[in-house]
Amino acid sequence: MSPLSFTVHSMPAPALDDAARRTASGRLKMLGVLAVCVAPVLASYFTYFVIKPEGGNSYGELITPPRDLPDDLPMATLAGEPVAPASLRGQWLLVVVSDAACGPACEKNLYLQRQLRETLGRDKDRIDKVWIVSDGGTPRPEVVAAVTQGQGATALRVPQQALAAWLAPAPGHELADHFYVVDPMGRWMMRAPADPEPAKFKGDIVKLLRASASWDRAGR
């Protein structure tokens, strides 16, 4: 009769178990951080679908898919100082585009831009006005003063050719014909009709702010 033999199996090393637990914990934390970062994006897309223009729910035209603000878009103040596109993120934007001459139609849009924001009540601090000058001319001082005084618009200069990488007019129109709505992540997501009806366009803005109230806060 052959003698009994005993096979000794290796026991799990406590150090290895601890390392595995730490690795698993780290992965869970990473997934949690990722979920927090992705949540606003998902909420933003939910916003678009909530107000999707079916059955007359939206007055403006939704841009599908939304167009991201390019990180390399050449932006500058009217004085020529460079501005990082990323500095515009973190707030809803209501954008007006014009040439430096800013004729009557431009002045009307800038006035309506101000009025739309002011009539939003306590939500007005969640949306910023942006005036983009798309040529190399010098705007009239009185227009600049009227637009930028107090809680005025952010006045920027962006060459029109470069601006086409982000914003675009409706067929048959010019960039200056529209208002452009940009979400807090820098994505252009709505274009108002040319010469919009203020009450109807304001209704779109109110819907956007209401739908994003759970994740968007005023201020960058």
Image (tube, rainbow, N blue to C red):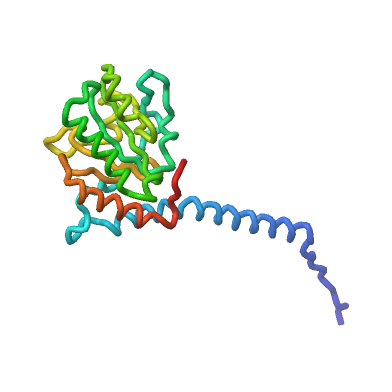
User: Within the image, what quadrant is residue 7 found in?
Assistant: bottom right
Residue 22 visible (yes or no): yes
Residue nearest the viewer, comparing 62 with 59: 59
Residue 67 visible (yes or no): no
> Which residue of the protein is positioned furthest toward the bottom in this rendering?
1
Image location (x, y in percent) of residue 132? 30, 29
Q: Residue at x 22, y 54 (%)?
A: 58
Image location (x, y in percent) of residue 24? 64, 58
Residue nearest the viewer, comparing 143 with 102: 143
- Side of 17 relative to 122 (left or right): right
Image location (x, y in percent) of residue 153? 34, 33
- Give above or below for 218 relative to 15: above
Residue nearest the viewer, comparing 204 with 119: 119
User: Within the image, what quadrant is residue 103 found in?
Assistant: top left
Q: Residue at x 69, y 56 (%)?
A: 22
> Which residue of the protein is positioned furthest toward the left in this rendering?
172
Q: Residue at x 25, y 56 (%)?
A: 52
User: Within the image, what quadrant is residue 113 found in?
Assistant: top left
Image quadrant occupied by the N terminus: bottom right
- Side of 142 relative to 104 (left or right): right
Q: Residue at x 22, y 48 (%)?
A: 201
Total labels: the figure holds 0
Image location (x, y in percent) of residue 126? 40, 46
